[in-house]
Amino acid sequence: MSGDMLDRYDLDNIAIGTLGSHSALNILKGAKEEGFRTVCICKEKDAIMYRKFGVADEMVLVQDFSELISEPVQERLRRLNAILIPHGSFTAFLSTEQLIHDLHVPVFGNRELLRWEADRKAQEEWLRKAGLRLPATFKTPEEIDRLTIAKLPGAKGGRGYFLAESPEVFHNKFSDMVRRGLLKEEDGDRIHLQEYVIGANIYPSYFSSIMKNDVELLAADRRYESSVDAIGRIPASEQLEFQVNPTYTVVGNFPVVIRESLLPELMRMGDSVHEMAKRLAPPGIIGPFCLETVITDDLRIYTFEISARIVAGTNVGIGTSPYAYLKYGENMYMGRRIALEIKEALRQGRLREALA
Ligand SMILES: Nc1ncnc2c1ncn2[C@@H]1O[C@H](COP(=O)(O)OP(=O)(O)OP(=O)(O)O)[C@@H](O)[C@H]1O
Ligand SMILES: [Mg+2]
């Protein structure tokens, strides 16, 4: 559907745009390096950052990101011949239905996959069918028989998640979270219970290229999460005394170079996730995606989530990452890779295929 919106576009004068947050510096810088004009839809208070880094040729100021679907903003974007690059803030501030039906500006990527991504059950089905190893899930708290992470749907950055190793501990901790105002009583029915895998968190980021018919591993990161990454700095006796509960608010990311012997499997995983996406929502993944994995001490890779879009973890690669370097040489990163794909699609007269 995005493709039809191109009819009124001047293809010699395409701009690349995105919401001013998440991975906008990455996306806009990459677009400029590939020679595109850039548009940042931005809140007044954040405009300083995009101005000072000089990555936005045009600024569309909004009070709230949900204004993206207002007619004046959409019309302005169409006048600028803008193609939008979606990132985490698109799905955080707009519903899947709004993004699929109410946004009449071309969007890079496959919007149909948003439905698969938005729903944890659908996501799991996709990853399982692709042959990936997933943590076990439990339907009710009574089934909990090992260390389990309790997740709320739509929680931002793992806020309100907690661990429990038995039904009793689950119920106690749940009541405690409600008392502390971190959860509401009615959240109980919506909690997703997943086996907690002890291991190293690795987030490999891939780029699925429609133009090259290839899935490229471009970067990897791990997150810096508050408070879980702070707990080891407190002596165990004090952790017990204060009953520290880990939370997972992301405050940053670290680049990771993965043990080389793990790369073949990670590459096969990327390929098969895309192959399965082709069947579930043709033509499959267009552009960036990221798997959220935990790797255990016996080197088993568990995948607990997928993002079918650019993730903020790829910001660690602005400039370059080892994997982007191996493939492209210097100065390649996810934001730039997206722009390169759009440029190639324009050159081959195939832009519509990148805007499913
Ligand atoms: N099954 C698991 N085993 C071990 N750790 C996990 C598991 N699931 C989640 N985590 C940890 O909890 C954090 C938050 O979980 P998750 O990514 O599912 O949250 P989220 O709501 O999807 O947040 P975001 O949208 O920011 O990714 C992860 O980064 C990871 O550190
Ligand atoms: Mg996640």
Image (cartoon, rainbow, N blue to C red):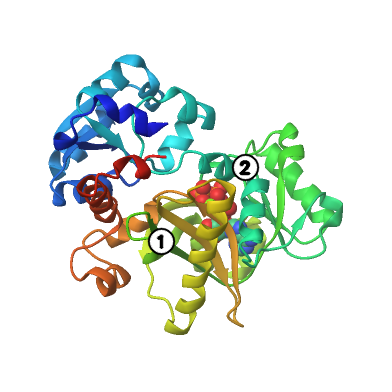
Q: Is mark 1 within 8 Å of ligand 2?
A: no
Marks 2/1: CA–CA distance: 21 Å
Residue name at image x 68 percent, y 63 percent = 135
Residue at figure coordinates x 23%, y 25% from the top left: 60
> What amino acid is at disc 1?
Tyr
Residue 234 in sight in this render? no
- Whether tag 2 and tag 1 are in contact, CB under 8 A, the answer is no
* Quadrant in which ligand 1 is drawn: bottom right
> Which amino acid type corresponds to the residue marked 2 in the rendered image?
Asp
- Residue assigned mark 1: 206
Q: Is residue 38 visible?
A: yes
Q: Residue furthest front?
A: 349
Residue at 47% x, 36% y: name it: 91
Quarter of the figure with the C terminus: top left
Instruction: Indicate which disc residue 119 carries.
Output: 2
In the rendering, at what x and y percent does residue 238 appear? 60, 64
Q: Residue at horizontal 14%, vertical 35%? A: 13
The image shows residue 301 at horizontal and vertical percentages of 58, 72
Q: Nearer the viewer, residue 162 or 223?
A: 223
Q: Quadrant of the N terminus?
A: top left
Is residue 36 found left or right of 159 in the rendered image?
left
**Counting other residues with Cα less than 10 Å from the Cα at mark 1, is it few (<14), some (14-19), or many (20 or more)?**
many
Q: Residues within 10 Å of mark 2 (few under 14, many from 20)?
A: few
